Image (cartoon, rainbow, N blue to C red):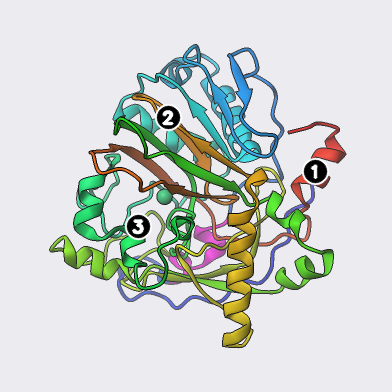
Amino acid sequence: MPPIAITPIEALPASPLLNPKQNNRARTDPDQVARNTLAGPLKYTGLLENYSHFEVTPSIGREFGPDLQLSQILKAANCNDLVRDLAVLISRRGVCFFRAQDLDQDEMMQLQKKISTLAGQPRESGMCIHPVSENVGEMGAKTQLISAEMQRKGGGIMRLHDDVSRWATRAFHSDVSFEKVPSDYSMLKINVLPPVGGDTQWVNCYDILDKMSPSMLEYLKTLKAEHNANFFHQEAANHGRAVSETMIRGNPLNVGDDLSARHPLIRTNPVTGWNALYYSYGFGGRIQGVTYDEHVMLREYLTQLCMNNFDCSVRFRWEAGSVAIWDNRSTLHSATFDYTEERSGDRASSIGELPYLSNEGISRTDGLRAEGVSW
Ligand SMILES: [Fe+2]
């Protein structure tokens, strides 16, 4: 494969918060610390086809039965081959579901790191550390607890958007997209469930591009958008904490208290070579290079594209022990906040590469057609 050509990356200022003994220039050079290491898209070799499974919708989602135990994949002699195929499958299907898993927290962290590494994670990227987490050490040694109680206390993405909208779909987001170097993959295991409610939904942002005219898509490829989560300062304050100014959150470029970044509006996934929309209302900030009025209209248009096209979405009903793993580069997701009882689980999320748009990037539809396959 030819090397992936990328759009120019905005220069980032050297952070004074990094260790002055280190070579700051190298530590803040995106080429050095934040470029995906794959030489080209990865092929799925079919190692997971013998486990019971079904495609949940034509566009997005595959569900595996309990005969596939992620804990056993970690112990298999051909573990790396299996996990590499798992990474490719997740990137192609957007999200994969696994029922009745016995995976513990340490194994979640191990598997998450391995998926990311085998999918070309930059050497300087590690596990995601959320700026508002309290139970995650600087080394990211633990999974992150998610719970309804914590969300009520802090505010949560919907409450903090209360003055903007009451629409449930406004909480769709891609994990930590407000970071300079955002997440590649996330894994969630739900342990405590309400009797009913709390489903999670995902949107396939590859297929959303097919809903646009070619000329609109070509225009959007020229734009960048801000992703902004500075509202998390209020959330941290509600927990009696502050966002750390010095903690490195999974990549040397993710440091400081400004929780915002500018990314290409259309992004190439290095694992598939397919382009996807990379924008959400949840963290969606100002679209760059257009007037304010155009920004408002474009934001609404892009949001409606994701929310109204339910042929590009999947909804998952959790059971105790269910695990979901998804690719944050090409999907959006949101919990459904329709419950009052406790809902808690463990999340493991990794930091990937600096988002880019490749000249080689193609649509998922064209990619599948060229391969002669349906997913
Ligand atoms: Fe999330």
Could one spot residue 299 in this view of the protein? yes
| Element on which disc 2 rests | strand
User: In which quarter of the view is residue 296 placed?
Assistant: bottom right
Q: Residue furthest left?
A: 240
Q: Is mark 3 within 8 Å of ligand 1?
A: no
Rendered image: mark on residue 119: none
Read off the residue under disc 1: 367
CB atoms of marks 3 and 1 within 8 Å = no
Q: Which residue, given by chain and number where applicable, does mark 2 sit on? A: 323
Callout 3, which amino acid? Arg
Residue at x 59%, y 60% (from the top left corner):
278
Q: Position of residue 122 (x, y in %)?
A: 52, 50
Q: Is residue 301 above or below residue 57?
A: below
Q: Residue at x 44, y 53 (%)?
A: 175
* Disc 1 residue type (three-letter): Gly
Looking at the picture, tell me which residue is in the foreground, 1 or 180.
180
Task: Relative to 156, say whether 8 is above or below.
Answer: below
Instruction: Tell me where residue 280 appears, x and y as whole percent.
Output: 53, 62
Taking 239 as reference, is 324 above or below it? above
- Residue to which mark 3 is pinned: 249
Task: Name which quarter of the figure residue 358 lies in.
Answer: bottom right
Q: Say above or below: 289 vs 108.
A: below
Q: At which x and y percent is residue 86?
A: 57, 29
Give the magenta range: 25-35
